Image (cartoon, rainbow, N blue to C red):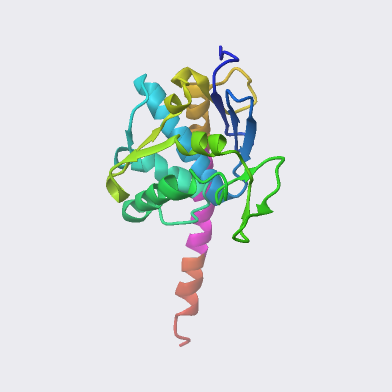
């Protein structure tokens, strides 16, 4: 059970939202509302899941999990970018380093219930306290770079533990964390297989079409 005095985070893979509760009694909901944005919420979920498997808050190597990351990119990210290691991992690294920590400009999500307003430089931003901005940014730590990057979702910087971060997915409200993540990935794998099986006959028919239309008329 999560104590009310602690910061905690809820990663909702049904609605693609991240709920953040702070000790300062600030409650925020971040909505990752496009396929490319949803991909980065799933990366956060992946890092949290891997840390929970290890039972400690630690750095997670991306290179060791390329198959899962490629699946996430293809299915939830709608292949917005290449799934090849030399392209995918540097892209995740850049977003984890620069875009995800930026809750003020929020290039990868919307802050639900708040409107962006112009700042002194005529840029539209979400106006949040320095404490909230720092608390959010401190979650995204990393070691290495590009293809050799390792990621850490540092809830301990908020005074929270692994138990204070929850992953949810599916209709069963009791399905959380490991079971929720495995169900999420399993669903993606099944949908990928169905998609591939539907594409095969189309590819076959196209090959027949090209074969017969390229034949010379005798």
Q: Is residue 6 above or below residue 11?
A: above
| Residue 189 included in the magenta stretch of the image | yes
- Name the outermost residue toward the front: 120
* Res 189 visible: no
Q: Of residues 128 and 55, which is closer to you in this image?
A: 128
Give the left or right position of residue 170, taking residue 60 as reference: right
Residue beneath the point at 40% across and 39% down? 68
Q: Of residues 143 and 125, which is closer to you in this image?
A: 125
Q: Position of residue 150 (x, y in %)?
A: 32, 39
| Residue 204 included in the magenta stretch of the image | yes
Give the left or right position of residue 112, taking residue 48 as reference: right
- Name the outermost residue toward the bottom: 218
- Quadrant in the picture for the N terminus: top right
* Res 187 visible: yes
Q: Of residues 85 and 119, which is closer to you in this image?
A: 119
Give the left or right position of residue 29, taking residue 163 as reference: right
Residue beneath the point at 61% across and 28% down? 170
Q: Position of residue 60 (x, y in %)?
A: 33, 34
Q: Main secondary structure of the magenta part?
A: helix
Residue beneath the point at 52% across and 63% down? 205
Question: Which span is picked out in magenta?
Answer: 188-205
Q: Position of residue 188 (x, y in %)?
A: 51, 39
Q: Of residues 194 and 18, which is closer to you in this image?
A: 18
Q: Is residue 68 above or below residue 115?
A: above
Q: Is residue 2 above or below residue 141?
A: above
Q: Position of residue 57 (x, y in %)?
A: 37, 25
Total marks placed = 0
């Amino acid at each position: 059970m999560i104590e009310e005095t602690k910061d905690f985070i809820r990663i909702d893979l049904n609605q693609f939202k991240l709920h953040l509760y702070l000790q300062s009694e600030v409650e925020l909901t971040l909505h990752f509302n496009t396929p490319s944005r949803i991909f980065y919420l799933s990366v956060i979920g992946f890092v949290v899941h891997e840390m929970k498997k290890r039972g400690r808050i630690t750095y997670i190597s991306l290179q060791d999990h390329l198959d899962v990351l490629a699946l996430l990119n293809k299915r939830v990210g709608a292949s917005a970018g290449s799934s090849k290691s030399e392209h995918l991992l540097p892209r995740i690294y850049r977003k984890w380093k620069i875009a995800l920590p930026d809750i003020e400009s929020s290039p990868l999500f919307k802050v639900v219930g708040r409107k962006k307003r112009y700042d002194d430089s005529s840029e539209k931003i979400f106006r949040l306290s320095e404490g909230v901005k720092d608390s959010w940014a401190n979650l995204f730590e990393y070691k290495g770079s590009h293809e050799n990057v390792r990621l850490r979702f540092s809830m301990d910087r908020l005074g929270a533990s692994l138990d204070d971060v929850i992953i949810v997915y599916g209709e069963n409200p009791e399905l959380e964390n490991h079971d929720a993540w495995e169900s999420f990935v399993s669903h993606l794998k099944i949908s990928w297989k169905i998609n591939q099986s539907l594409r095969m006959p189309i590819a076959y028919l196209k090959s027949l079409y090209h074969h017969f239309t390229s034949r010379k008329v005798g």
